[in-house]
Image (tube, rainbow, N blue to C red):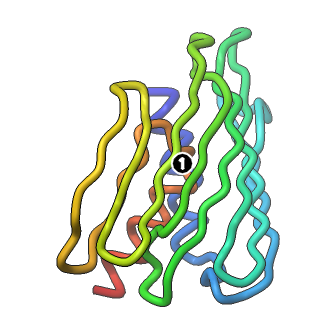
Amino acid sequence: MKISLITGLCLSASLFAATAADAATERYTVIFGGKAVGHLTADTEGAQTAIVFDYKNNGRGPTMAETVSVDAQGLPTAWTISGTTTFGSKVSENFSRKGDRASWVDSTGKGSTTVSEPSLYVAQGGSPWSVGLYARALLKD
């Protein structure tokens, strides 16, 4: 329930956020049980956004730092995610797409593929901000 509530709060705000082409800072507060327990900040300049997501509820919660770059369609071309999960597991994930070649590293290992049409990378350890990125890309399509 905690994750659903947090995702819902951030998703609602992200759907109305500035596009990646704008320079903007978005700030969200994670609220649980009427108390502020964390934050999500997304600093966008041009096609790149730096995200910091951190919340602690009962001493547990994720701490993530992300950097994502998108193309003109709003699809990720580069994405790095580092930090820790709710229960302290290390996160070290990255994705890149150059031309028709996509490659990534996540907790399951390395992967790569050739893409022949617009494709969306779904981050394994992405913050709730990523849900807004997916929604914007899908709505644009």
Q: Nearer the viewer, residue 91 or 127?
A: 91
Q: Quadrant of the N terminus?
A: top left
The correct choice, above or below, for 139 with respect to 64 in the image is below
Name the residue type under label 1: Pro
Snapshot quadrant of residue 38: top right
In the rendered image, residue 117, in percent from the top left (x then y), is placed at 20, 80
Going 43% across and 71% down the picture, which residue do you hit? 98
Q: Position of residue 76 (x, y in %)?
A: 47, 68
Image position, residue 10 (x, y; %): 58, 54
Quarter placement of the C terminus: bottom left
Would you name the residue on which mark 1 appears?
Answer: 128
Residue 92 quadrant:
top right
Residue lying at the far left of the rendered structure: 116
Q: Is residue 135 left or right of residue 61?
A: left
Q: Residue at x 79, y 59 (%)?
A: 27
Q: As displayed, is residue 36 above or below residue 60?
A: below
Q: Position of residue 101 (x, y in %)?
A: 32, 66
Q: Horizontally, is 81 left or right of 22 in the view?
A: left
- The relative height of residue 40 versus residue 6 in the rendered view (above or below) is below
